[in-house]
Image (tube, rainbow, N blue to C red):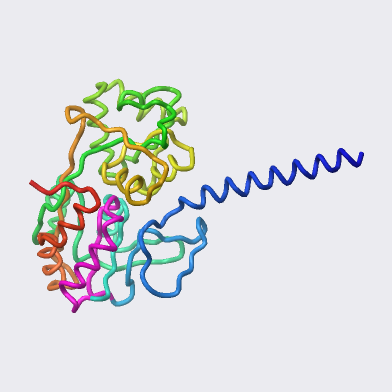
């Protein structure tokens, strides 16, 4: 009896240690991944960790709505802007999916947990086609500038355990895919276009319909955070992402992931556009920031994180 109790205790300790180690492994990868601003630091991931609100939310001198996949550039970009324009020190930036940001502009409000945000943006950035659509539909913008380009890539775990070689492998029944939701993620249209290039409508239907229904395709709510995290935590085998997101996770964060390149003939390259709002609350700051986005200093930040220059 005594030996049985000892064996049970040993097994319990081993199990507890394994669970703790597993939890620690997952916690190590949790966002936010940017350097935080100065001040009292408090977060309890995953209960309280606001990763896509940056900077000063009280009485900002400039409000920026960035397409979420650019979250990694925000810290360096805003530091460079403040150096070029020291009169602007209180800056608020959001890096949510562009469709969510557009809905926030339309409604005038964003609620995150118990936080209600009614800030209006001075600058909105998104894919070139999304900017054109919103301008045609709403007439929001006073001025625009194309500042970067980005192709697609496939993010997989280090060692590529599922032996993913291209987009067609994402249609396999044994491959769990993390896929941006077309309802609010502009990247989804680009990825689906690449699916059709690689395998026609049949591949797109398999990944976006059949595999969604059977649970092997997971539709994200905020893909630039969820897709890398799901791959890192072993919940998804592959995630089509912008190449800069894979570059950031692999080269900047040194997380255990790899990139599977998509050939140019089957790839899609997005152009990103910054737009100054007609009703920008901080008109001069908006003009200064849009001009800054065209400067060598801003372009250097985007090159650092793997973005291609605009045409």
Between residues 116 and 263, which one lies in front from this camera angle? 263
The location of residue 212, given as percent across then percent down, is 41, 31
Q: Is residue 109 left or right of residue 293?
A: right
The location of residue 243, given as percent across then percent down, is 26, 42
The location of residue 258, given as percent across then percent down, is 36, 37
Q: Is residue 16 left or right of residue 298?
A: right
Q: Quadrant of residue 117?
A: bottom left
Is 156 part of what is drawn in magenta?
no
Question: Which residue does the image show at 14% across and 61% down from the upper left?
Answer: 293
Q: Quadrant of residue 86?
A: bottom left
133 above or below 104?
above
Question: Which residue does the image show at 11% across and 48% down from the upper left?
Answer: 310
44 above or below 87?
above
Q: Is residue 78 left or right of residue 165?
A: left
Question: Which residue does the image show at 42% across and 42% down from the upper left?
Answer: 256
- Which range is magenta? 60-88
The location of residue 189, given as percent across then percent down, is 24, 37
Placement of the N terminus among the 4 image quadrants: top right
User: Residue reaching furthest right?
Assistant: 1
């Amino acid at each position: 009896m005594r030996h049985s109790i000892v064996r049970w205790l040993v097994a319990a300790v081993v199990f507890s240690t394994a669970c703790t180690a597993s939890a620690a492994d997952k916690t190590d990868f949790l966002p936010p991944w940017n350097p935080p601003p100065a001040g009292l630091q408090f977060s309890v991931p995953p209960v309280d960790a606001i990763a896509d609100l940056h900077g000063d939310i009280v009485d900002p001198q400039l409000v920026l709505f960035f397409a979420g996949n650019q979250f990694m550039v925000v810290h360096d970009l805003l530091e460079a802007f403040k150096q070029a324009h020291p009169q602007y020190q209180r800056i608020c930036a959001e890096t949510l999916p562009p469709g969510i940001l557009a809905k926030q502009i339309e409604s005038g409000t964003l609620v995150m947990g118990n936080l209600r945000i009614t800030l209006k943006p001075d600058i909105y950035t998104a894919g070139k086609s999304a900017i054109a659509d919103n301008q045609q539909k709403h007439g929001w913008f006073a001025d625009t500038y194309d500042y970067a380009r980005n192709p697609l890539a496939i993010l997989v775990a280090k060692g590529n355990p599922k032996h993913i070689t291209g987009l067609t492998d994402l249609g396999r029944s044994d491959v769990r895919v993390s896929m941006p939701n077309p309802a609010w993620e502009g990247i989804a249209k680009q990825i689906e276009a690449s699916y059709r290039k690689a395998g026609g409508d049949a591949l797109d239907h398999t990944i976006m319909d059949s595999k969604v229904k059977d649970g092997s395709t997971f539709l994200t709510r905020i893909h630039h955070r969820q897709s890398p995290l799901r791959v890192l935590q072993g919940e998804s085998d592959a995630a089509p992402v912008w190449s800069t997101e894979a570059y950031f996770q692999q080269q900047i964060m040194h997380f255990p992931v790899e990139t599977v390149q998509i050939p140019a003939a089957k790839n899609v390259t997005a152009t990103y556009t910054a737009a100054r709002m007609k009703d920008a609350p901080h008109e001069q700051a908006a003009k200064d920031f849009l001009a800054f986005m065209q400067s060598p200093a801003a372009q250097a930040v985007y090159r650092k994180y793997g973005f291609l220059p605009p045409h």
